[in-house]
Amino acid sequence: MRIAVITGAAKGLGLETARQLSNLGLRAILTGRDETALAQAGERIENAEWHGLDVADAASVATFFDWLAERHGRLDVLVNNAGRVYGGHGASLLQTDPEVVLEAIQNNAIGAFRMMQRALPMMAQGGYGRIVNVSSGMGALTDMGMGAVPYRVSKTTLNALTLLAAREAPAGVKVNAVCPGWVRTDMGGPNATRDVESGAHGIVWAATLADDGPTGGFFRDSAEIAW
Ligand code: NDP
């Protein structure tokens, strides 16, 4: 049975991605910072287990992978979903504290970077791997708007790390970035245009790509979009 690790899985897109992967027969390992919320979420999903993990904390990532190696000895799918927004979407470049930009990069991009550094060697051992970095069109250089500077820069950084990891990925391992669209979660808010099921769909698609599927791409609804 394939082992899938999902970060930030106590709610929102992470939780729905875990649910859909479990429905497809994968063993979903939900991870997150709030262990109470995580346990409540995990109990609602068949074929799931859960473990505390703060991707912004190197020691937490190391502890998690030690546990994973001992418990399962393999990793097939990694969904780097954990992310948060920093400040209002309206704040301009001039109003933005550079320290907050660094904090956003730490959490939304370096967290995924750490996860990939531990995941790739495990996937190399198994000769199979699917890594999905949950990004955003707000990080696309070709579609750069204004405002939300920390969030945008963190997702652009995540996109760069996606490509770099794809270039170095061992045989059988695919690394892609996915924008879920504007989704009704705590982050997306009630006015977002998509429900969480359809938002997670494109993530699950990239997490279960066939052997001839793409790598090193940026996708929304299974269609390639520009970086
Ligand atoms: P939610 O706010 O509902 O969920 C985000 C989850 O990420 C939370 O469980 C949060 O945990 C977790 N998280 C944040 N930082 C960390 C961390 N350091 N370690 C572990 N977990 C962490 O948001 P969504 O479900 O909407 O977002 C999921 C992903 O999708 C994010 O990466 C987001 O940027 C991306 N996205 C969402 C869009 C939308 O419209 N909703 C649009 C485009 C992209 P905690 O509660 O502890 O903070």
Image (tube, rainbow, N blue to C red):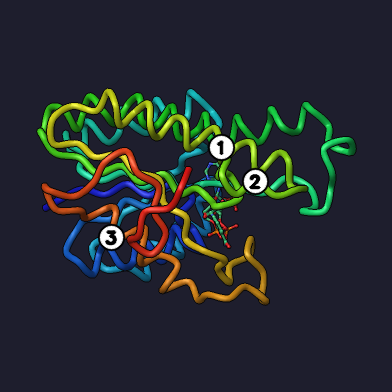
Q: Which mark is residue 156?
A: 1
- Residue type at numbered disc 3: Trp
Q: Answer with left or right where residue 65 lies relative to residue 108.
A: left
Where residue 86 appears, x then y in whole percent?
73, 45
Q: In the figure, 129 relative to 28: above or below? A: above
Q: Are marks 3 and 2 in contact (CB under 8 Å)?
A: no
Earlier residue among tags 2 and 1: 2
- Residue type at numbered disc 2: Met
Residue toward you, 6 or 215: 215
- Residue placed farthest to the right in the image? 95
Where residue 181 appears, x then y in whole percent?
51, 63
Q: Which mark is residue 103?
A: none
Earlier residue among tags 3 and 2: 2
Which residue is depicted at the point 52% across and 75% down? 194
Which residue is depicted at the point 30% across and 33% down? 67
Where residue 157 appears, x then y in whole percent?
54, 32
Gap in angstroms between the C-alphas marked 3 and 2: 26 Å
Which-is-in-front pick, marks 3 and 2? 2
Give the residue pinned by disc 2. 144
Which-is-in-front pick, marks 3 and 1? 1
Q: How many marks are shown on the rendered structure? A: 3
Secondary structure of residue under mark 3: helix
Q: Residues within 10 Å of mark 3 (few under 14, many from 20)?
A: some
- Residue type at numbered disc 1: Thr
Q: In the figure, 40 relative to 64: above or below? A: below
Give the residue pinned by disc 3. 205
Gap in angstroms between the C-alphas marked 3 and 1: 22 Å
Q: Residues within 10 Å of mark 1 (few under 14, many from 20)?
A: many
Q: Residues within 10 Å of mark 2 (few under 14, many from 20)?
A: few
Gap in angstroms between the C-alphas marked 2 and 1: 10 Å
